[in-house]
Image: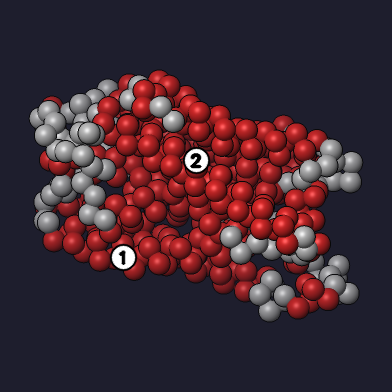
Amino acid sequence: MSTTGHHVDISKERLVLGDAARKVAVIAGTIGVLAFAASAALGLRGVGDRFFQSYLVSYCFFLSISLGGLFFVLIQHVTRAGWSVVLRRFAEGLAVNTGLMAVLLIPILIGLKPLFLWARGDEIADDALLQGKRAYLNELFFYIRMLIYFGSWILLSRYLFSKSVAQDASGDPAATLQMQKVSAGGLFLFAITVTFCAFDLLMSLEPHWFSTIFGVYYFSGSALVLFAALIITSYFTQRSGWLTGVISTEHYHDLGKLMFAFVVFWAYIAFSQYMLIWYANMPEETQWFLRRQTGQWTALSWFMLIGHFIVPFLALISRIPKRRKEPLVGAAVWVLIIHWVDMYYLVMPHTSDGVVPFHVIDLTCFLAVGGLFVAAFAMRFRRRSLLAQGDPRLAESLAFENF
C-alpha cells in the first residue's frame, strides 16, 4: 500500500451529526420500544419461553457487532494502523454499545431457567454429567462471569473512545501511545472474555454438548459482521452528506478484503468444528449436529453452508465489487442477514418433529434490540466528531491507496 493519494481538506467536511443524530435516535428508539412492547405482549399471550429464545438470538447478534467493533479498535491500535483512522470512530461507537448490551442482558437473566437446562436444579438432580458441571454451570457464578465480561468490555471501550475523542481537541500524540499500550493487554482480555461468554450464552444452551473451538466460531462471526456494519454505516453516512471526501474507494476496498477474509475464516472454523466432531464419532458431541440434520433443519444447515460461505465468497472474490459501493453494500447486508440466521441456528432448540420454529416474535425481538442499538449509536455522535481528527496518523489515512 502507499500513502500518496489526494489531499482532503477536513475543515470543509461535515463531521458532527447534530440534530440528524437526534432524529435517527428518536425513530430507531421508538421502533425499539414499540417492538419490545409487542414482543412482551406476544410472550404473555401463549408464546411463553419462545420470547426468551427469540430475544437471545437477536441479543447475541447485536452483541457480536459491538464485540467486533471492540476487536477492530484494539487491533488497529496494537498494529499502529494508519489506513483505518478515518473509519475507527465508527468502530469505537459500536464498541461503546457494550454498555447498552449490559442493560439489555436483563431479560436473559430473568429468563435463565426457561433458556438454560442447567439452571433448573430440580430437573437435573439425576443427571450425573450436569451435576459434575455444577461448579461452573450455576446461577451465581453465571452472574459473576457476566459482570466480569461486560465490566471488561465497558471499561476498555469507554477508555478508548473517550481518549480518542479527547485527542480531537488536544492533538496530543502521547494519547495514541497510551491507547496502544492499553490495547495490547486488552486484546488478551478480549480473547478470554469473548470465548467464555460464547460458551455461557450459546454453547451452554445444550449443556451435554461441548466444542473447544466454539469461542473462535463466535468471534469469527463477530469480526465478519463488524466489517459489514462499517461498510453499511460509512455508505449511508456519506450518502447523507457527512464525511463525503474522507472515506474513499480505497477504504471500502480494504473493508471488502477484510470481510472476504473473515468469510473464509468463519468457513474454516465452522468446517473444522464439524469435521473433528463428526470424525471422532462421540455420541455426546455428534448429537448436536445430528439434530440439525433432520427434518427442516437439514435445509437450514445447507442454507447456512451456501449462504454463509459460497454466496459471499463468490460475491467478494473479485476486486471489482470491493471498489464499487453498491455491490459491496449489498454483500454486507447479506452478511448481516446470514449472521442472524447463524445465531438462530445456534440458539433455537431442536423439536421432535424437526420443524424450524420461525415466528413473528423473531422479527419483533430483532426490531426491539436493533432499534435501541441504533438509537444509542446515533446519539453518541450528536455532538462528537465522526472522525478521529487528532490522531497523528490521520493524514496517512486520508491519503491511503491500495496497490
Q: Does residue 213 appear left or right of residue 283 in this picture?
A: left
Give the x, y percent position of residue 168. Answer: 17, 47
Distance between the alpha carbons at the discs numbered 1 and 2: 25 Å
Residue 272 image point, x, y percent? 60, 53
Residue for badge 1: 184
Q: Is residue 247 above or below residue 258?
A: above
Numbered disc in front, either 1 or 2 = 2
Residue 108 falls in which quadrant of the image?
Answer: bottom right
Name the residue at 61% across, 64% down.
Answer: 212
Which residue is denoted by mark 2 in the rendering?
263
> Could you tell me residue 9's position as x and y percent?
10, 30
Which color scheme did the rendering employ for the protein? secondary structure
Answer left or right for 192 relative to 36: left
**Is any part of residue 37 visible from this angle?**
no
Residue at image coords 24%, 50%: 81
Residue 100 or residue 156, whichever sits in front? 156
Kindly state the secondary structure of the residue where label 1 is placed. Answer: helix
Q: Residues within 10 Å of mark 1 (few under 14, many from 20)?
A: some
